Image (tube, coloured by chain):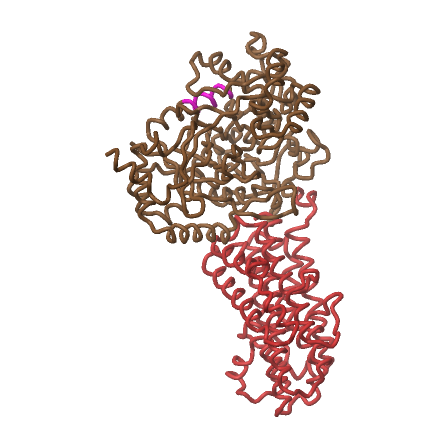
Amino acid sequence: MHTAHSRQFENAVLKNYLLDHAYDEMFSGPGELHPHCEPLLEHFSSLPPDELQRRKHSADLSFLNQGITFTVYGRDEGTENIFPYDLIPRIITAAEWEKVERGLTQRITALNLFLKDIYNEGRILDDGIVPREVVYSCKHYRRQMAGLQVPRNVYIAICGTDLIRLENGEFVVLEDNLRVPSGVSYMLTNRRVMKRIFPQLFRSYNVRPIEQYTQLLLGTLRSLAPEGRPESNIVLLSPGVFNSAYFEHAYLARQMGIELVEGRDLVTHDNVVYMRTTNGLRRVDVIYRRVDDDFIDPMAFRGDSILGVAGLFNAYRAGNVTLANAFGTGVADDKALYAYVPEIIKYYLSEEPVLQNVETFLLTRPKERQYVLANLDKLVVKAVGESGGYGMLIGPQSTKAEQEEFALKIEADPRNYIAQPTISFSRAPCLIGDELEPRHVDLRPYVLYGDKVTIVPGGLTRVALKRGSLVVNSSQGGGSKDTWVLSQ
Amino acid sequence: MLSRVADSLYWMSRYLERAEHTSRLLDVNLNLMLDEGPISAERRWLRVLQALGKPKDIGWAGDPYALTRTLTFETEHKASIVSCIISARENSRHVREQISTEQWHRLNSLYLQVTRPEMQSDRQAQALLAGTTQPSEFLQSVMEAVHQFQGVTDSTMNHGEGWQFIQVGRYIERAYATTLLLEAYHEDLWAHPEQIVEGNEYLEWMGLLRSATAFEAYCKVYTADLTPDRIFEFLLLNEAFPHSVRFSIDSLQCALEKIQGDGGRSRAETLRRLGGRLQASLGYSSVDEILNQDAVAYLKNIQAQCQEIHEVIYALYVDYAIQTALAG
């Protein structure tokens, strides 16, 4: 058995496959495959190299023709790129998934209770579990939400939590995305392409389906409709065609059969939201909004926003329209608040967290700040309110000048940054040229919370396609791959 | 349906129709130019420009290939074929979730074909400039793609309100373009309306018909004997030919009726009246009558009515005041 593995490891496609201390999603040791990866490697080794390239090309073309693209900011406005895509699926066993699912359910439940609490009684603040100043200094804390009842007490209806695997293979939470998480359309289209390109392989694994996601999302949104509106009109609010995730907005709206609207399509009158149709105005009940808080209502928030709808917040306050997610959920995915999530889970649920956090240094604490400033070359520093891999310092890969720049920034505004150890999170095989090479991956499962918590098995596996890179964001050279959760 | 969606579908359709029409007009004239004709090159290409509604900042500079290149590739000109395709695709992108995947696929492929540098045929552009080859391959491929798009649209999209707005866009553009075409040819061709033409002049007439894909259809009705009054009748008043003005207005009116449905009739009274009047005028006119009067004025009048219908559609479905909508 062992020799058979070694021989496979010497396989031509693996000649550049070097293991390091990071957890490997395919090999448990030199020449030792995880048992569930055997058929996978066998299948890929049996294909001639041209064939892999041919299939890759066919997949790329299919993405381009379907217009499955995202827009990169900072360069020419409106440059469309395809989201790089890797052919080798990432496999998660049933047992691994069971724990992830349990952990995510626990986490979203606790975070919802937390949001309800801080925007109402504030028990957790009174009890000193989370310091008031941490909550009130969050960039995304919305005092307008104080004392407001939201339907079913659901603040976070849709979340995408980023998980990584430590060197021992354990899944931990890297960050929660509780505002407008994106990427789910890539999860769905990756699966569709994979099933077309590797039908036999797919069939030979018992992969749990994910295609029901859009229907589940629709059900979640419907369950949040204001009372007394049985035939609710649900819409998806997009910033428009220049947004980097526009493809996804259009895709989800189409798959759910709901209208995709932009700010200019909506008007409010007497605290009711309407959309402009060819047949006059039609009332809107639930808005799945993919626009950030700041831009959603120029009267309540940023006055310079042209993406929003004037008066929307008042209609929301009046309970005439539901927004998913609610306003102000960003307070719970603030990177400084993240450090308190294990405590939050214990406080509301009296349970131990199923999924652990990554060790986090809060720079407002003098001791921790001192340690961080002395060890900037070893740590990762992140701005608390940013996402998408922006505003980040990766110590081991940074220059002295960059470190000094961050040191100054930290001293000037310690609340705005956190630091974490540089984690060599797990690596999975990717097709680079004609060969397989390991690349760092994370996992973003999508969690829905309406009547109950639902998670489709898997999520979006993002890949740092540059060798050695730890940044998986699509804006920074990341790609994705299909994620297969096995049913047994 | 959202007003913005109706707006985008309407313009997507208009731009594609325009791209197709421009392609055909250029293809036909590049082809005719190869034979010695009764008119000068200058006259021919000025006529092409007139038939395209005299696009802004594009003039005749003596080189038919340079002009063709401008009208085909130059994206700084809104009237060029590539610009039209970009605009159509941009509009379709705004309503990506409203059209079928197949439609998007077809249109997006056309867009990539004409805009992506690695796919854009520099050779073709150079060949055009040098006048060494016919650009008809490119023009043909655009026409084919638009036809395919229309086929895909008809067979994969719900024939609901959105589809009707696509029809409205296509036929209003077509009616307008055909009247412009007839107007542009008027001066050269209406000297002897009832005479059967021969020789080189015959090619010009064929060119006019071909510019509206009408040659074969005409022959089936009137045989290959071409006379100006019959051509005029065919392109303006024929009931069954899809590029005739009458057919276009009939189709337009039909689509508008469907959009109005049963409920919107009173609201859309003005639109019904305008569409109905134009339809009746085409349905009950005779070609002799029109040719005996001022034919150019007649054509211009149709254009003005199309413009008016366009404006009323906007006021009714897209750009209405919110207070009136709340009151109604």
Q: In which quarter of the image is residue B84?
A: bottom right
Q: Where is residue B108 in the image (x, y as percent from the top left)?
A: 54, 56
Image position of A462 (left or right of A330): left
Query: What residue is shown at x 37% (from left), y 49% (from top)?
Result: A196
Task: Give the colour chain A carries in the figure.
Answer: brown
Q: Position of residue B28 (x, y in %)?
A: 60, 77
Where is the C terminus of chain A found, in terms of image quarters? top left
Magenta stretch prevailing secondary structure: helix
Q: Position of residue B180 (x, y in %)?
A: 68, 73
Nearer to us in this view, B10 or A64: A64
Query: What residue is shown at x 52% (from left), y 65% (from top)?
Result: B145
Image position of A348 (left or right of A80): left
**Can residue A177 be found in the magenta stretch?**
no
Q: Which residue lies furthest to the left in this view?
A: A1
Q: In this view, does A472 lie above or below B247?
A: above
Task: Give the colour chain B carries in the figure.
Answer: red
Nearer to us in this view, A164 or A240: A164
Q: Quadrant of residue A207?
A: top left
Q: Where is residue A57 in the image (x, y as percent from the top left)?
A: 44, 52
Nearer to us in this view, A30 or A255: A30
Q: Which stretch appears magenta?
A: A103-111
Where is the N terminus of chain A found, in terms of image quarters? top left
Q: Is residue A448 above or below residue A135?
A: below
Could you tell me how many numbered marks the image carries?
0
